[in-house]
Amino acid sequence: MNKETLIIQSEDKEGLKKAAEILKKGGLVAIPTETVYGLGANALDEDAAKNIFKAKGRPQDNPLIVHISDIDQLKDLVSEIPEGAYVLMEKFWPGPLTLIMKKSDKISDVITAGLDTVAIRMPSHPVAREIIELANLPIAAPSANISGRPSPTDASHVIEDLVGRVDAIVDGGRTGVGVESTVVDISSGIPTILRPGGITEEDLLVVFPRVDIDPALKGEDENLTPKSPGQKYKHYSPNAKIKIIKGELFSMINRINHLYREYTNQGLKVGILATEQSRWSYSCDNLIVVGDRGRPETIATNLFDSLREFDKMKVDMILAEGIEEIGIGKAIMNRMEKAAGFDVENL
Ligand code: TXA
Ligand code: MG
């Protein structure tokens, strides 16, 4: 693929109109959202949707999220709106929550990868909303990375992966949340988290007495297939191998220092993914401080960028500290464990 890719600054109003025009004509435009950048196309145009899969090298059995800017768009996209969905939409839209509902006939099997449900999200990012409004269309958009790579949290990441493969990239600077939206299946009564994300289980429990989590997410039982097809792939991966060490901070530091020496002695170039609380406990040239354990949202914001930074350092191996799995910590560990292919050592 060798397309000419237009780079549009998000402050450029004419540029945003152009982005909307490209979408209307069936083109591909990467747009910033509050979670990660998305690679958008007209969700009602099957050929445009097919081109998303080509540009990303995405497996065809992994369905896309459809983005809307107005609740009125929903009625064309889904065949029924379950009771529970209203409560969630009221409370968390616009925002990092994706709802799975029964699809309407207007949604092609290309978007849903043949499933009878469709994923819908209303982003809160002003630029994403403006482009969807200007295009006046529902926009299908997976994360704007080459499949398998860490999701893009800055326009430079999208440029790295997709220049020459898409028609335009809208640069809106860094995204905020840093991990993708929470995917919740509401099509069969009890809300079930298929992918942890920006809206936490704790947030959902404020409005629902019971919330289930897809048991396949942990990767502990190979016989369980995740209900969200995207969760079955190794993902978010930098080129280096990742090993996660989980335990008390002091024990993690000791174990990582031990492994660092061991791998370095084997001639490997080793990186360490540390936190503010541990940064002074390592002596390693390839150290990245991902954020502050006291404010885990900072870790979510920086995680994918840190993984891409390790690629630039050309490390062979990354030793990463585990993060406490509460609040946004669940989404962080889900992404890290998948990036590590579930190579996790519990101390
Ligand atoms: O924050 C986000 O959700 C970002 C921004 C761009 O909105 N998008 C994103 O899209 O992360 P993507 O394609 O990288 O991830 C979509 C996830 C995949 O795991 C996919 O399998 C799941 O949503 N999904 C989509 N449709 C589904 C459906 N009908 N049933 C179950 N899972 C579905
Ligand atoms: Mg993705």
Image (tube, rainbow, N blue to C red):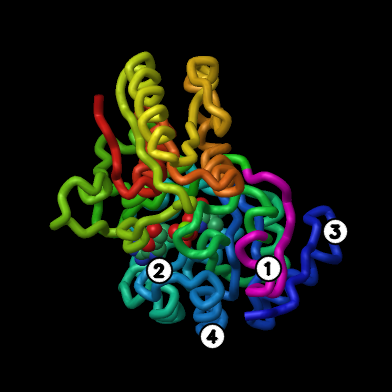
Type of amino acid at the residue the image marks with label 2: Pro
Residue 292 at what x, y percent from top left?
53, 23
Q: Mark 2: is the Cβ under 8 angstroms from ligand 1?
A: yes
Type of amino acid at the residue the image marks with label 4: Asp
Q: Which residues are magenta?
A: 160-175
Secondary structure beneath label 3: loop
| Image side of residue 35 versus residue 244, left or right | right
User: What is the quadrant of the N terminus in the image?
Assistant: bottom right
Q: Is residue 288 magenta?
A: no
Relative height, residue 9 to residue 244 (above, below): below
Mark 4 vs 3, N-terminal side: 3
Relative height, residue 226 to residue 347 (above, below): below
Secondary structure beneath label 4: helix
The residue indicated by pointer 1 is: 163
- Please tell me whether mark 3 or mark 1 is closer to you in this view: 1
Q: Which mark is residue 47?
A: 4
The residue indicated by pointer 3 is: 12
Q: How far, Cα to Cα, is label 1 from label 2?
A: 23 Å
Secondary structure beneath label 2: loop
Q: Tell me if mark 2 has few (under 14), some (14-19) or many (20+) residues whose alpha carbon lies within 10 angstroms of its own.
A: many
Which residue is found at the position 74% from the left and 72% from the top?
Answer: 5
Q: Tell me if mark 1 has few (under 14), some (14-19) or many (20+) residues whose alpha carbon lies within 10 angstroms of its own.
A: some
Q: Tell me if mark 4 has few (under 14), some (14-19) or many (20+) residues whose alpha carbon lies within 10 angstroms of its own.
A: some
Q: Tell me if mark 3 has few (under 14), some (14-19) or many (20+) residues whose alpha carbon lies within 10 angstroms of its own.
A: few
